Amino acid sequence: MEINVFKFCSGLRVLGHVMILLVAAIVGVSYYAVVFLTYGPLLLRGGFDSFLSFTIVIIFHVLLVLLLWSYIRVVLKDPGSVPENWRAVSGEESLEVGTSLAAAEDGFERRSRGGGYCIHCQNGKPPRCHHCSICQRCVLKMDHHCVWVVNCVGACNYKFFLLFLLYTFLETTMVTIVLLPSFINFFGEAKNHSSAAKSAIIFLAFDSVP
């Protein structure tokens, strides 16, 4: 009896859902440290401190919204499916794989030069299409399966994945910069029991930034 070991890879999707909760936890801790503990209270002081805090909070929220939007899109967006009964026909003008998916869903038979056959899906495999052992499906222009988004990165969600990386870099860089003064004062305030909880949250938020 032949056992397909690749079927066990689908269990990694469970780990991906844990990663989503981890991302939510990192975002929550960072938000609480930046907005509620550090710069939120400074908004009521007035003067330059209030203006600087307002600017930081606005930029932080804008980047956070863009980060969450791109993350949700890359998680929920289909990376690109191969139409049923797809087959390669030589001698005809190739059609760009990964575009006009609506036409494919209506039963359009996609044709292209090259390609191959997937023995797992029992279907034709267009060029630059790969079978994901975790999702148990073929993905158009598959780049990789990202456990952080519980999805493959392919033709239809690659743009959102790159945007997610960009906004994550900008947001984490900003969090590192704005929490750096508080992090420097962390060890000095640690002896004060009344501020120990605040210092611990700031330390955790700063330490969770890549």
Image: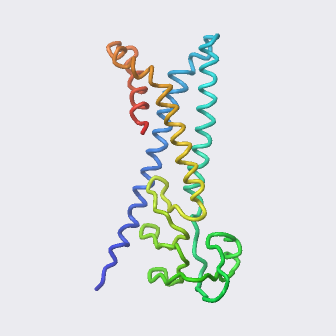
- Above or below, 187 against 7 in this view is above
Q: Position of residue 41 (x, y in %)?
A: 56, 17
Q: Quadrant of residue 58?
A: top right
Q: Position of residue 113 (x, y in %)?
A: 59, 83
The residue under the point 49% across, 27% down is 177
Identify which residue, 88 or 187, lies in the foreground. Answer: 88
The residue under the point 61% across, 47% down is 69
Q: Quadrant of residue 124?
A: bottom right
Q: Which quadrant, please, contains the N terminus?
A: bottom left
How did the renderer colour the structure?
A: rainbow
Q: Which quadrant, please, contains the C terminus?
A: top left
The residue under the point 44% across, 83% down is 119
Q: Position of residue 173 (x, y in %)?
A: 50, 34
- Above or below, 123 against 49 in this view is below
Q: How many marks?
A: 0
- Above or below, 197 against 147 in this view is above
Identify which residue, 33 or 139, lies in the foreground. Answer: 139
Residue farthest to the left, as pictured: 1
Identify which residue, 57 or 130, lies in the foreground. Answer: 130
Q: Position of residue 31 (x, y in %)?
A: 52, 32
Q: Quadrant of residue 140?
A: bottom right
